Image: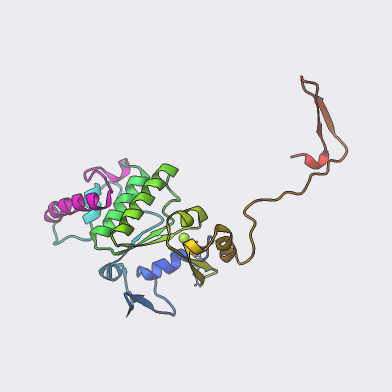
Amino acid sequence: MGENGAGKSTLMSILYGFYTADSGTIRVNGQVQAITDSSHALSLGIGMVHQHFMLVDNFSVLENIVLGAEDSGFLKPSLDRACKELTRLEHEYDLEVDPDAIIEDISVGQQQRVEILKALYRGAETLILDEPTGVLTPKEADDLFRVLRTLREQGKTVILITHKLREIMAITDSVSVMRRGQMVATVKTSETSPEQLAELMVGRRVLLRVEKAKPSPARPCLKSKTRSSRTIWVSPASRM
Ligand SMILES: Nc1ncnc2c1ncn2[C@@H]1O[C@H](COP(=O)(O)OP(=O)(O)O)[C@@H](O)[C@H]1O
Ligand SMILES: [Mg+2]
């Protein structure tokens, strides 16, 4: 987690092979890896669901899942095989979508499921989701969290990028905080609090509740009487 602009997406894009790191090392299961592109990341079991989906709008769900992962130069044999595999994945992870639906006709929540299925179809063991709830309704976000819990139960690693404290507290096991391009802390969720995370995120104490000073009304500039004949005072200091 981290504030907007902290460098979360950049770091994840390095992990997924979109950008090259200037320094540092990436270890996958203890082995140092120089990840050169996204197909390399996928071959190491790292999949990513981007903040902005990367689907072909006028293609079907199934075509989108297969695209780029075909067995040969022809789409048809891959589609037949993929259909079976997709049904299996949908059952295993409780991720129902209609394989024949066209992307532009389905909801954003469903499109996100397609992105997740796409990564799973390519053998992702670690799934990175970059700000996945930003585009979702509260109900869709709850559905997504249910899916993420299932993925965890099935042994997958989920990296959830977010700046929403509520989501961190609700679903994660551990939290790493980024600030101005640096990783500043890693803590267990059960051993931290929203207050501590907010402080780590911005680098100083944060009041999550706004404390307002007592108003000090000055000379009234407008008086009016309501039907119950109470007097309402509007003073220059409290004018909007
Ligand atoms: N380690 C870094 N050093 C210098 N600039 C960085 C670093 N990480 C990110 N940036 C720059 O900071 C900006 C915001 O990064 P981004 O990854 O989009 O943040 P976030 O996803 O946390 O909102 C981008 O312009 C990015 O190029
Ligand atoms: Mg980002």
Q: Is residue 147 above or below residue 182?
A: above
* Residue 210 lies in the magenta stretch: no
Question: Looking at the figure, which quarter contains the C terminus?
Answer: top right
Residue drawn 32% across the image and 46% down it: 110
Q: Is residue 109 visible?
A: yes
Q: Position of residue 56 (x, y in %)?
A: 29, 51
**Residue 123: image location, x then y, percent:** 24, 63
Please state the horizontal and vertical placement of residue 181, each as a whole percent of the image: 51, 70
| Residue found at the very far left of the displayed protein | 77
Q: Judge whether residue 1 can be spotted in this image.
A: no
Placement of 227 over or under 137, stated as above or below? above
Q: Is residue 130 left or right of residue 47?
A: right
Main SS of residues in magenta: helix
Q: Where residue 195 sits in the image (x, y, percent)? A: 58, 59
Q: Report which quarter residue 152 is drawn in.
A: bottom left
How many numbered marks have been drawn onto this rendered protein structure?
0
- Asked whether 143 or 18 is in front, the reply is 143
Name the colour scheme.
Answer: rainbow
Residue at image coords 31%, 40%: 105
Highlighted magenta segment, given as a residue range = 76-105
